Amino acid sequence: MTTTPDGLGHNAATFREDWLEGLADAYARTLRRVPGTFGVVGRHAPRPGKVALVIGGGSGHYPAFAGLVGPGLADAAAVGDVFASPSAEQIYRTAKAADGGAGVLMSYGNYAGDVMHFGLAARRLAAEGVPVNTVLVTDDVASGPPPVEGQEIDPSRDRRGVAGDFFVFKVAGAAAERGDDLAGVTRLAARANAMTRTFGAAFAGCTLPGAAEPLFTVTEGTTELGMGIHGEPGLRTTRRLTASELADELVDNLLPELPPLPEGAGGGRVAVLLNGLGRTKYEEMFVVFRQVNRRLKAAGLTPFRPEVGEFVTSFDMAGVSLSVMVLDDELAELYDAPCDTPAFRSLPGPRTDADDVRETAALPEQRQQAAPSAADLPATAALQAALDAVAANEDELGRLDGVAGDGDHGIGIVRGLRAAVAAARADEPGPAGDPRSAGRALLGAGLALADASGGASGALYGALLAETGAVLVRAPEGASCTTALLAEAVTAAQRAVSELGGAAVGEKTMLDALDPFRAELATRGGEDLGAAWRAAAEVATKAAAATAELVPARGRAARMGDMGYGHADAGATSLALIVTAVGSTLR
């Protein structure tokens, strides 16, 4: 028994048996183990007169392959050891358990071991009088040139099968479910494969059960474009891409590879699958799909019943792949047919596709923002300076917050300040020296920041801006923005932040920078505003640095004990950055 870096102990020798037994226990309503084999067969199988779809491959790719067994999809799946083909004996026994007398279609990815073992099993079944056909899946565009039409696939040369497996299995399973004969099911599975293309990218490798080190690695800060699901080398290495850049790479590598749209297939319909390789989170994949959807539509294609999720994984590999199947009417009907498996269910009835018309309200942080301008009024200019300062230090704020927190302070405050700037730029009426105008802008900016940023920091910074604005809007007509007036506003803001957060000075929060700033500004009430504010900002900066000597006493960080000792508080640091930046605008 060894322990992998994820903390789970695995016995590599029994891993396949252990997880298959657990799967069968969890989904006994859907499938069962084939006695004496590493295979599963659907509760619905065998069904007399129905073609049996038998799929399979190595462990480590769940939901492929055992998770896709059930009515409307595969009838059975044979499972090999991690990243290894099941043996011919295991495949033979699994297929026998699923055979309903109408023949067997075997379908699997184009890997040499699978081809040999499934081929041996098929020969044995055929020798016993069981009709058997085979459809290899060859969707991975990065693994080689496309197969030559009419030429037999060469496993050592032609493309591998990856997440496009799902499309082929789904079409074949639906055709078998509706009663097509073996020749018909085979024809449609082969057509689905011919119309499917996949391209993937990886950011980190995977660690096998029982191993202490990764099977393969991806250089930190890079993306491997075209890497295979077993760590096969990609086409090229690039820097770590943003979600939109990654989506563009996926689409750009697939569009030239797609087969022509079938004649009479209106709307350019394509089935679309954004597949996670095991570690990439669903929310991240949805961000990628947002751009994928836009790009496909811009290319004149209509995503039909798109899917985002895990379908063919590679243990804990970080990355995604994009699969596209060009549809004709028959393929679309079969892809849309119902099925029920442990990992995927498709129900009949109304659905919403990616081509539906949607009305989406703009989020606060998406309000139209003009570029920073010398014409910005004082509150807007101050908030823009604060945004620039925090954005320049976003990574460091995240690092400080991650010491004993969740690491989102930098990105959250940047997002909130963007919304605050947009709100102030839209709402600050002027004139430039009127504190009531600045106050109205800060009131709106505070609400926008809290809404866009979220979390505790968003609420506290939102209150700080809003309470500052509330004091300023009550200034007498004709008043100016003096040091005394702003000191009064900051004092009110400090009180609001303290009451809202329930914290006190010395508990390692933003108050440990805000309170010294407030006190210093109050002592300089008769001085020039710009000079007084900058002096107070220096005090806040020193106080923020001194929070490294404090132990957190509030929030999640307080439960982490001394973990935060020796590191400045993220909230106090961002407060110091903000007041320093604001001071640069006060002349």
Image (spheres, helix red, strand yellow):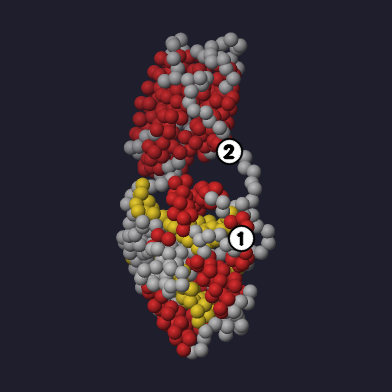
Residue 281 at least partly seen: no
Vertical relation: 238 (above or below) 2: above
Vertical relation: 357 (above or below) 389: below
What secondary structure is marked by label 2?
loop
Residue 18 found in image quarter? bottom left
Picture disc at residue 265: 1
Q: Residues within 10 Å of mark 1 (few under 14, many from 20)?
A: some
- Amino acid identity at mark 1: Ala
Residue 54: % across, % down? 51, 76
Q: Which one is in front, 561 or 11?
A: 11
Q: Which one is in front, 142 or 522?
A: 142
The quadrant of the picture occupied by the N terminus is bottom left
Residue 100: % across, % down? 57, 83
Q: Which one is in front, 425 or 268?
A: 268
Residue that lies at the very extreme toward the right in this rendered image: 349
Vertical relation: 480 (above or below) 237: above
Q: Name the residue that disc number 2 marks.
A: 363
How far apart are the alpha carbons under marks 2 and 1? 37 Å
Residue 229: % across, % down? 40, 62
Vertical relation: 488 (above or below) 338: above
Residue 522: % across, % down? 46, 16
The quadrant of the picture occupied by the C terminus is top left
Q: Which one is in front, 484 or 174?
A: 174
